[in-house]
Image: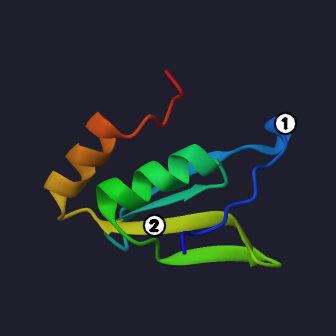
Amino acid sequence: MGKKYKEPLKAEMETTINVLYDENFLSIYTNNVKLQKQLSKIIGKPKKEYIKGKSITGSIWSISLDEKSKISKLILKANIFEL
């Protein structure tokens, strides 16, 4: 059975990308269902999933800054900006 995601209200939809230089990783959080599915396909399983009831309400990925090919793939293939 596939994962079940909870779609947020449009006004509450967010994606946050942080570069933690000192810790040498890129952190991505999103509650955008479409983007969560894309990121799972492109860069793999999230580090953490926020769950409410039986639905996923948001996910976090952490990527080492040394994984340049994974970061490139993310930027090229994920529709982060809904373009």
Q: Position of residue 58 (x, y in %)?
A: 66, 63
- In which quadrant is the N terminus drawn? bottom right
For residue 77, which numbered disc appears in the image?
none
**In this orientation, which residue lies closer to the viewer: 69 or 43?**
43
**In this orientation, which residue lies closer to the viewer: 65 or 58?**
58
Q: CA distance from mark 2 to mark 1?
A: 22 Å
**In this orientation, which residue lies closer to the viewer: 19 or 10?**
10
Q: Which residue is located at x 51 percent, y 29 percent?
A: 81
The amino acid type found where label 2 is placed reads Trp
Q: Position of residue 80 (x, y in %)?
A: 48, 37
Q: Which residue is located at x 31 percent, y 54 percent?
A: 42
The amino acid type found where label 1 is placed reads Ala
Element on which disc 2 rests: strand
Q: Which residue is mark 2?
A: 61
Badge 2: residue crowd in 10 Å (few <14, some 14–19, many ≥20): many
Q: Is residue 68 left or right of residue 30?
A: left
Badge 1: residue crowd in 10 Å (few <14, some 14–19, many ≥20): few
Callouts 2 and 1 close, C-beta under 8 Å:
no
Q: Is residue 10 left or right of residue 30?
A: right
Q: Position of residue 17 (x, y in %)?
A: 51, 50
Location of residue 67 (image quadrant)? bottom left
Element on which disc 1 rests: helix
Figure check: 32 above or below 80: below
Q: Position of residue 15 (x, y in %)?
A: 61, 47
Q: Which residue is mark 1?
A: 11
Of the numbered discs 2 and 1, the one sitting upstream in the chain is 1
Figure check: 73 above or below 27: above
